Image: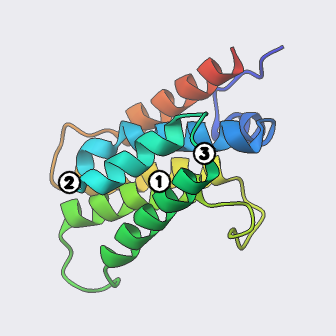
């Protein structure tokens, strides 16, 4: 029986019930949803690699390296003048990096798909500063719908 997903607590419970591979794929789907906020084709390719459940380990390792490098390169310090769209791009790469992180690289026990979901929401929040067509609540609902799809 599928878990009802109507709150973030429901989403986290659903994500915790997934296999590592399913978490990676769903986390990358969260990143893919906000991918338009990132201009780097390599990050888009990394996300596409992560979405494919048949991607070989070597390709996944390279995809993680690319996403992590872009997230690191686009990081800006708090308190400085902010380019909101550049910050949004950073969070797209951070979402991909979270989803693609190999189990032995993760420093905490948090679910990588949940981390990707939160980073994707951060991308939307940044984009909302420049683009009033963006909506965090719409993104949250879309994430719930994606998770329900995975459950079948």
Q: Is 22 positioned to the left or the right of 134 in the image?
A: right
Distance CA(mark 2)–CA(mark 3): 25 Å
Tell me the number on the disc at residue 96.
1
Tell me which label, 2 or 1, sits earlier in the chain.
Answer: 2
Marks 1 and 3 in Cβ contact (< 8 Å)? no
Decide if residue 74 is on the left or right side of residue 107. left
Mark 1–mark 3 Cα distance, whole angstroms, equals 17 Å
Q: Secondary structure at mark 2?
A: loop
Mark 2 or 3, nearer chain start = 2
- Image spot of residue 143 (x, y percent): 52, 33
The residue positioned 56% from the left and 60% from the top of the image is: 61
Numbered circle sitting on residue 136 = none
Side of 18 where 33 appears, left or right: left
Quadrant where the image shows the C terminus:
top right
Q: Nearer the viewer, mark 2 or mark 3?
A: 3
Q: Is residue 41 above or below residue 1?
A: below
Q: Residues within 10 Å of mark 2 (few under 14, many from 20)?
A: few
Residue neighbourhood size for the residue with mark 1, other residues' Cα within 10 Å, grouped as few (<14), some (14–19), many (≥20): many
Tell me what residue is drawn at x 53 percent, y 47 percent: 117
Q: Position of residue 96 (x, y in %)?
A: 47, 53
Closer to the N terminus: mark 1 or mark 3? 3
**Mark 3: which secondary structure?**
loop
Q: Tell me which residue sits at (60%, 34%) in the image.
A: 54
Q: Position of residue 48 (x, y in %)?
A: 42, 40
Image quadrant in which the N terminus is located:
top right
Query: On screen, 52 above or below 94?
Result: above
* Residue matched to label 3: 56
According to the image, label 2 marks what residue? 39
Nearer mark to the viewer, of 1 and 3: 3
């Amino acid at each position: 029986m599928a878990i009802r997903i109507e709150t973030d607590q429901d989403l986290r419970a659903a994500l915790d019930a997934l296999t590592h591979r399913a978490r990676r794929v769903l986390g990358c789907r969260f990143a893919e949803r906000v991918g338009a906020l990132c201009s780097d084709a390599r990050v888009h390719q990394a996300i596409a690699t992560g979405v494919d459940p048949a991607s070989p380990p070597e390709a996944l390792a390279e995809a993680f390296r690319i996403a992590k490098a872009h997230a690191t390169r686009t990081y800006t310090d708090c308190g400085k003048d902010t380019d909101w769209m550049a910050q949004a791009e950073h969070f797209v790469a951070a979402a991909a990096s979270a989803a693609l992180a190999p189990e032995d690289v993760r420093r905490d026990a948090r679910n990588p798909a949940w981390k990707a979901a939160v980073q994707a929401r951060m991308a939307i929040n940044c984009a909302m500063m420049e683009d009033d067509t963006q909506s965090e609540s719409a993104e949250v609902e879309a994430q719930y719908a994606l998770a329900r799809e995975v459950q079948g």
